Image: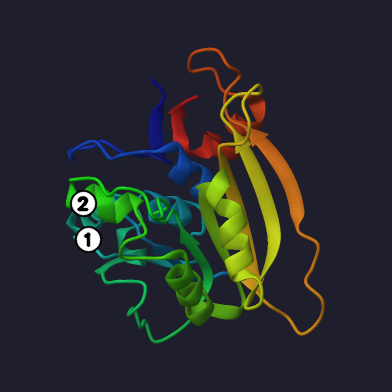
Amino acid sequence: MTSFRFKQFVVRQDLSPMKVGTDGVLLGAWATVRASDRRMLDIGTGTGLIALMLAQRAPQARIAGIDIEEVAEARANADASPWGERIEMVQESAQTFSPGGRFDLVVSNPPFFDGSLPCPDAGRTAARHTVRLSFEELRDAAVRLLAPEGRFAVVLPADAATRFIVLCCGPLDLVRRTDVRTTPRRPAKRVLLEFTPAGAGPAPVPERTELTVGTGEHECYTPEYRVLTRDFYLRF
């Protein structure tokens, strides 16, 4: 198995193993990070994975991670990293979070099961089902928290992405989309989306690309996935 890293910070260290999912890795590596960005927000931070990736990519920025669940694990992971002083973890809902300023980049790997049977485990339900954070509420939080020139990036299942794009139409403009295949022969399973606050003129034509994660052989990744994520692996 490949080992995940943040520069010289190995995820495991003396902590329990951090959950490192492909969705989070993709979003943390793919979201646009500009040299001028100074404030970033990770909605639904979980273990803090994406917040840590942003901290590595943007040494000039301060990063906030919020989650409706307990953030002790995320805080411990941040404190064990070289960037803990620039990362704030807050147990707060996206609907009520009031940081006193806006963000240059907002990212989220949000709950995505909508209307399906909840899991008996309350924590898994909160993480995976839109019970406590609907797509509409996520959109509204992004609109409220984004700076005028900010960007909002999410990763969603392919079947949910179309509905989310429609929900965002009006207050947000889609500027970038990447459809993600697990292997070349499979249809896109995930979609990476990036939005900006809507301007006064016509909506821009979004940049659209595809990314394939694996070649189809066991634990064999494509060159394009390696290029995107190589700064975050010890051995890749």
Circle 1 — which element?
Answer: loop
Q: Is residue 45 above or below residue 150?
A: above
Kindly identify the amino acid type of the residue bearing the numbered disc 1.
Glu
Which picture quadrant has residue 174? bottom right
Going 44% across and 57% down the picture, which residue do you hit?
55
In percent of width and height, residue 208 lies at 75, 49
In percent of width and height, residue 211 lies at 66, 36
Q: Is 115 placed left or right of 144 in the picture?
A: left
In percent of width and height, residue 202 lies at 82, 76
Marking on residue 69: 1
- The single residue placed furthest to the top in the displayed view is 217
Kindly identify the amino acid type of the residue bearing the numbered disc 2.
Gly
Circle 2 — which element?
Answer: helix
In percent of width and height, residue 108 lies at 45, 59
Going 37% across and 59% down the picture, which residue do you hit?
130
Judging depth in this view, the residue of 54 and 140 nearest the camera is: 140
For label 2, the residue is 123
Check contact, mark 2 vs mark 1: CB within 8 A.
Answer: yes
Separation of disc 2 and disc 1 at Cα? 8 Å
> Closer to the camera: disc 2 or disc 1?
2
Confirm whether residue 200 shows in the render: yes
